[in-house]
Structures are given as C-alpha cells and as structure tokens.
Image (cartoon, rainbow, N blue to C red):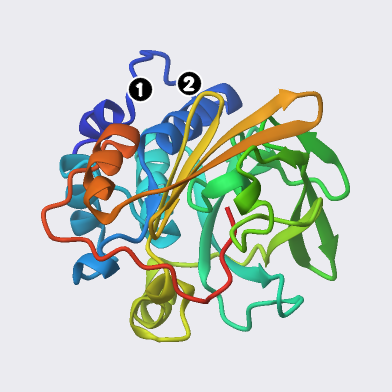
Amino acid sequence: MDLEAYFERIGYTDSRKTLDLETLTDILQHQIRAIPFENLNIHCEEEMKLDLKTIFEQIVRGKRGGWCLQVNYLLYWALTTMGFETTMLGGYVYSTPDDRYSNNMIHLLLQVTIDGRNYIADAGFGRSYQMWQPLELIPGKDQPQIPCIFRLREEGGIWYLDQIRREQCIPNEEFLNSDLLEKNKYRKIYSFTLEPRTIEDFASMNTFLQTSPASVFTSKSFCSLQTQEGVHCLVGLTLTSRRFNYKDNMDLVVFKTLKEDEVNEVLKNLFSISLQKKLVPKLGDQFFTI
C-alpha cells in the first residue's frame, strides 16, 4: 500500500506534511470530499470486507467509498503512516426512535494526539452529521463548523457527541414530512469511551451489519459525499442535495426521486463511483436520516 496513492485518491497535493492540527484538518477534509460514505457493496451482492489491503484496493485503487469501519480504518492507516499518534475508538450510535444508544459497539472513530491535546477525527458518519474538522476532546464546549455546532459531553468516563442543527428549507413540498429528514434541532449522534480498540474488535459487528435483517445497512442502500458547500445523499432512489447555511441559520435541502436507470449516472457524476455489478437500490423501513 502506498501513501502517495492515498494522497492522490483524496486530491491532497500539499507538500506540507507537518504533524499538526492544520495538516490533520486538511487530510480529513480532503478525504470526506473524495471518499463517499456508502454501503453499495451489500446491494450489489458483494461483501463489505475489513482487511486493510482489500479496503485500500476498493477505496484507493477502485475509487469507491465504504462505511465507517472501512473509511476510518483507512484514515487510521494514513495518519499512523504519516506519523500521527492515532488511536482507534469504538462508538455506540444513538437511535432517535428508541431514544437510546446502541447496545453494541458499531462505529469506529479515531483519537489523534497533537502536542499533548486530544482530538476526535471521524470521516465515516456521513450525511449532515459529518464533522468537517477534528473536534478537540473538551467537554461542554461548542465547536462551530460549517455543517452545524458540535458539542462533546462527558459523564463518568463516557463521552457523547451531539450537534446543534439549523432550520431546513425544503422547496419540494411533497417531501416536507419525509422520513429521511432530521426533525430534531439538538441531535445526539454517538457515545464512546477512550479505551483503545483494534480492528479485530469490530469483526463480528462488520458481519452482523451486512447480514442481519435488523440492520439499517441491509434495509437501505445509501451513498453520501461532502462538497465544498454541503452534502449529496442518495438513499434508495431518493437523491438529496443539502447546502449548509444558504440563508442565516437555514440549510437548503432539495429532493429528487430518480428512476432506477438514472442511478448509475448519478453515482458517476455526483459521487465519482462506477459500479462493476448491478445495484439494487433499496429504501426499507429502518430509520435513517440525511
């Protein structure tokens, strides 16, 4: 595996590679704007594999994306190879319908330590919940970014990531009550501890998430990619484009329902993805918002 190939994949051309917060932020932003958060393998009857070589071939050589276990594992490898002090952490994702965090550790995120300060870096949550900059590991501090205001809380050694969102303008009136829309202004995202993890800790969950009928990832096909102004999301045949803060404290969200024969062209033009196998778009009944 080649770090220069990774840099080329994410479009990172800066010769400056000092191990500081500026470089970490630059790498994170390049990755989230080049590598989609997606689970399309599942809906092309292919496996979401967890070994680093396969992930590298899929994402870097094959110009695809992946879900958190893959894209954040790739980011971990890149940062560690560069020389950053990087630690894998495990997250428990908040479910709005159940009003609780998952019982199982289903999310991989990273802690990066720079000059004695700890930061959370996560390139794998996607949609309008995706951080654009690393978050300093400080409880109770608002950390404004273009997508929203992020806030970390800590209680008894457990950390919680929340966000404060803007209002939403939806020109397509028929989608005003769409199940895909996030309705909460204050949104809990996930919890985590600072216990170091390894990729092996996620192996059984990687299998469960792509095989269980109870998994949102088998229920829905999705792909999201951050842009300079917002984020594109494709869930089943529903395409959304979000522009952050297009008016004061207001995001613009435009919906479009695709025909099945339009999907591959949209994936190619908006997400730079060319699939080798037939995708069966799916919009099941599991809760999933954009």
Q: Is residue 150 above or below residue 215?
A: above
Q: Secondary structure at mark 2?
A: loop
**How far apart are labels 2 and 1 at the CA level?**
14 Å
For the view shown, which residue lies furthest in the left direction?
276
Amino acid type at mark 2? Thr
Task: Name the spot of residue 5 as percent of width and height, x first.
Answer: 21, 32
Amino acid type shown at disc 1:
Tyr
Front position among marks 2 and 1: 1
**Label ID, residue 18:** 2
Q: Could you say which is closer to the camera, residue 253 or residue 157?
A: 253
Image point (36%, 68%), residue name: 282
Residue 248 in view, yes or no: yes
**Residue wearing tag 1:** 12
- x and y percentages locating residue 162 in the rendered image: 76, 54
Instruction: Locate residue 13, reporting x and y percent.
Output: 33, 16
Work out whether 20 lies above or below 60.
Answer: above
